[in-house]
Amino acid sequence: MSSQRRRGRFGIPPISSPFALLPREVAVLAAVAFAVAIGFGIVAPAIPVFARHFGVGKTAAGAVVSAFALMRLVSALGGGRLVERFGERVILSTGIFIVAGSTGLSGLAQSYEQLLVLRAVGGIGSSMFTVSAMGLLFRVSGGANRGRAASLFQGGFLVGGLVGPVIGSVLTGISLRLPFFVYAVSLLVAGGIAAVFLAHVRLRNGADPAPAAAAEEPVEESLGVREALRSSAYRAALLANFGTGWALFGVRMSLIPLFVTEAEGMDVDVVWVGIGFFCSSLTQISFLMYAGRYVDDVGRRPAMVRGGLIAGVAMLAVALSTALPVYIGAMLLFGVGSAFLGTAPGAVVGDVMRGRGGRVVAVFQMSSDSGAILGPLLAGALADLFSYGWALALTASVLFAGVVMSARMPETGPAAGIRDRA
């Protein structure tokens, strides 16, 4: 690969077809991610409302959502072990069909207890899908294109996540059970796509070895979690992903809406919460292609540093000002940072892992899920004790901690001399 492809003027990658060198399997995984995300978005508005349909309180209704997330977290390592034993493709399809079955049955639930158990089972299937899909993504993409692959995969999730709730709100108005059935169908479509188009794949090991023959598993032993944790790059990826879960999936979803509608000096309608979120998501999607190319052509380390700094500054901007234009601008800025943080840490894990590496990927997933659970709790407690500003400043500090560790890690991508032999 020439230096011109790696860097354009001022260190910015030149414009080219960003996904021209990606294998077909990456597009298939992105399509599966879209089908899963749009279905989840469809059912998300209906879950707490359907739970309340059984006469339970708000806390019990929220527990249905929490049960799914909790089981995703606690079952991740088990899913990683299954991946290492049976392979990514088998566990990916199995996980999708478990979520499909549990979701369809949730739509038929006759009691709150049935709904709670079925959503918990769905969380296990979701964890199996996520760990296996990410592991397969890292193995089918070469080191020189892993950032692009991660950005396309994330794009599938994000676009599906934007479209799904819109459809879900309409379906929920028709019937509280209908979104569950539609979600189950979308999952069956995703599982069918995976089963048909991922039957024969070209797998890789580690950062950038030559691909193995189609449908053959490389014989290289999988990297263990303890060995992976010896890598400062892997530890930096975990902390950056923890910060992403804390800020993007935790505090942004739980605390920012309260800040916008309740903080002294804001005094704006709740509709601005949705506008800010939409701007953030749209910006993140728009920057994903650029971020993926930057991760591959400039480096994982500078991408993680840049993403963490931008996202952290965005949180500080919200913390220090109650002006509506600052909030909108900060959400736009946060979307840019999230594009880098959604691609670079995963590319690092793909560089570090060896073989199937199910548990290595599982711990990476758990870092984000842990941040999404702890962030709202700790930041929320700080907001109750002091102010929203202190809570958002803590969130920025978590992101900046990832920046410090990322700045000290060795480069693992093309900037370190990796070449794609495919």
Image (tube, grey):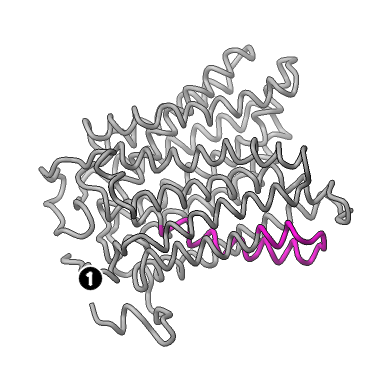
Q: What amino acid type should be assigned to the residue bearing mark 1?
A: Gly
At x 36%, y 81%, the residue is 7
Q: Secondary structure at mark 1?
A: loop
Q: What type of secondary structure mainly makes up the magenta span? A: helix
- Residue closer to the observer: 344 or 237: 237
Vertical relation: 342 (above or below) 47: below
Residue in front for this viewpoint, 302 or 182: 302
Total numbered badges shown on the rendered structure: 1
Rendered location of residue 362, percent (x, y): 36, 38
- Image quarter where the N terminus lies is bottom left
Q: What's the residue at 73%, 63% (across, down)?
A: 328
Q: Nearer the viewer, residue 229 or 142?
A: 229
Residue 332 is one of the magenta-drawn residues: yes
Q: Is residue 88 visible?
A: no
Residue wearing tag 1: 417
Q: Residues within 10 Å of mark 1 (few under 14, many from 20)?
A: few
* Quadrant hosting residue 419: bottom left
Q: Quadrant of the C terminus?
A: bottom left
Residue 315: x %, y % from top left: 66, 57
Residue 202 shown left or right of residue 54 in the figure: left
The vertical placement of 187 against 259, above or below, is above
Judge whether 123 appears above or below 348 on screen: above
Q: Is residue 358 left or right of residue 322?
A: left
As for residue 200 lying within the magenta part, the answer is: no
- Report x, y in % for residue 17: 37, 74
The magenta segment: 315-344
Q: Picture quarter containing residue 167?
A: top right
Res. 108 in view? yes
Identify the residue shown where x is 65% and y is 65%: 332
